[in-house]
Image: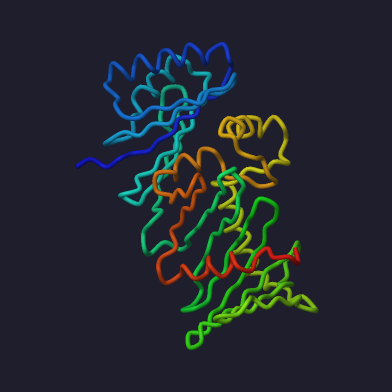
């Protein structure tokens, strides 16, 4: 049985060429018998195609059309949920370029993630997590209004947890202790503890990579966020300080748990699920 491929094509360039490209690529899709679910979300300066097809990625129609409209730039993102892989590429002047493929669900992956989006589009919680010990994790947490680096440790005997986070600087300045049957206990770390430089560089790189692939900011330059803003308005979503990219939402929606319009997607395994539960209970908290 063929695997279901979820792929998006985003085409940018002069509006005068986009309409002609759109007509041509649709003709080529018919000629090459590209079948499956097909959605479009176009704007004046960009075309956006969202396809779900069985088998491989339908590159040929877009590559051929790119050769006829060489000034247009085409970015491609796809995911095979069953195979546990995703990828990106560009199509430039009729040629496939910059193709990258990575694992998203392999047990040996160096990090895991979780994303919760409310029904109105607000980013309730996003995490990217590194396991650094049997019961110790570090990572980056983000909501629609703030972010932080974190470290969390659990006592294997009592399951009591200690969560520490940053708050605007490269230092651990906030802490919560979580024990069974009790509300989390918050305390400010005074004086704050500077994060060792090597650890901070690792976490900062993790955060930057996560943001680059998943997040756009409502405070960004108007011309850079215009497409995302329009897509959010079409979806009936609120725009916050931090938001999940519309293309990322499309990638994950088939694998996410949908609860009345709220989405929850994650790759944390059963041994690590407690990390998300504890952070959701504590952070950002009333002391933010």
Which quadrant of the figure contains the N terminus?
top left
- Identify the residue at image location x=33%, y=20%: 29
Looking at the image, the residue that sits furthest to the right is 191
Residue 178: x %, y % from top left: 60, 78
Looking at the picture, how far across and down is residue 141, in whole percent? 61, 60
Residue 20, x across and y down, in percent:
48, 11
Residue placed at 55% from the left, 82% from the top?
A: 160
Eyeballing the image, is 269 above or below 78? below
Quarter of the image for the C terminus: give it: bottom right
How far across and down, in percent of the image, does residue 89 sit?
44, 36
The residue lying toward the viewer, choosing from 121 and 7, is 121
**Rendered image quadrant of residue 140:** bottom right
Looking at the image, residue 12 lies above or below residue 83: above
Question: Given the current orientation, which residue lies at the most extreme bottom position?
Answer: 157
Residue at 28% in and 20% down? 32
Q: How is the image coloured?
A: rainbow
Could you tell whether 207 is left or right of 38 in the image? right
């Amino acid at each position: 049985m063929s695997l279901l491929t979820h792929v998006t094509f985003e085409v940018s360039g002069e509006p005068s060429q986009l309409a002609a490209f759109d007509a041509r690529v649709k003709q080529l899709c018919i000629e090459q018998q590209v079948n499956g679910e097909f959605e479009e979300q176009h704007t004046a300066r960009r075309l956006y195609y969202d396809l779900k097809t069985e088998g491989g990625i339908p590159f040929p129609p877009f590559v051929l059309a790119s050769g006829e409209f060489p000034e247009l730039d085409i970015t491609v993102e796809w995911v095979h949920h069953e195979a546990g892989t995703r990828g990106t590429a560009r199509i430039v002047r009729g040629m496939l370029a910059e193709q990258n493929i990575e694992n998203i669900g392999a047990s040996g992956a160096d990090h895991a993630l979780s994303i919760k989006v409310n029904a109105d589009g607000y980013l309730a919680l996003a995490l990217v997590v590194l396991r650094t010990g049997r019961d110790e994790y570090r990572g980056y947490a983000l909501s629609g209004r703030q972010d932080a680096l974190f470290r969390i440790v659990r006592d294997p005997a009592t399951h009591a947890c200690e969560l520490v986070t940053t708050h605007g600087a490269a230092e651990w300045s906030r802490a919560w202790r979580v024990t069974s049957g009790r509300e989390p206990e918050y305390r400010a770390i005074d004086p704050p503890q500077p994060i060792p430089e090597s650890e901070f560089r690792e976490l900062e790189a993790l955060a930057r990579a996560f943001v680059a692939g998943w997040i756009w900011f409502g405070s960004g330059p108007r011309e850079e966020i215009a497409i995302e803003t329009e897509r959010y308005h079409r979806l009936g979503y609120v725009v916050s300080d931090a938001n999940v990219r519309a293309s990322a939402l499309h990638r994950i929606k088939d694998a996410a748990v949908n609860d009345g319009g709220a989405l929850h997607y994650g790759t944390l395994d059963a041994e690590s699920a407690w990390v998300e539960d504890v952070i959701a209970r504590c952070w950002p908290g009333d002391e933010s």
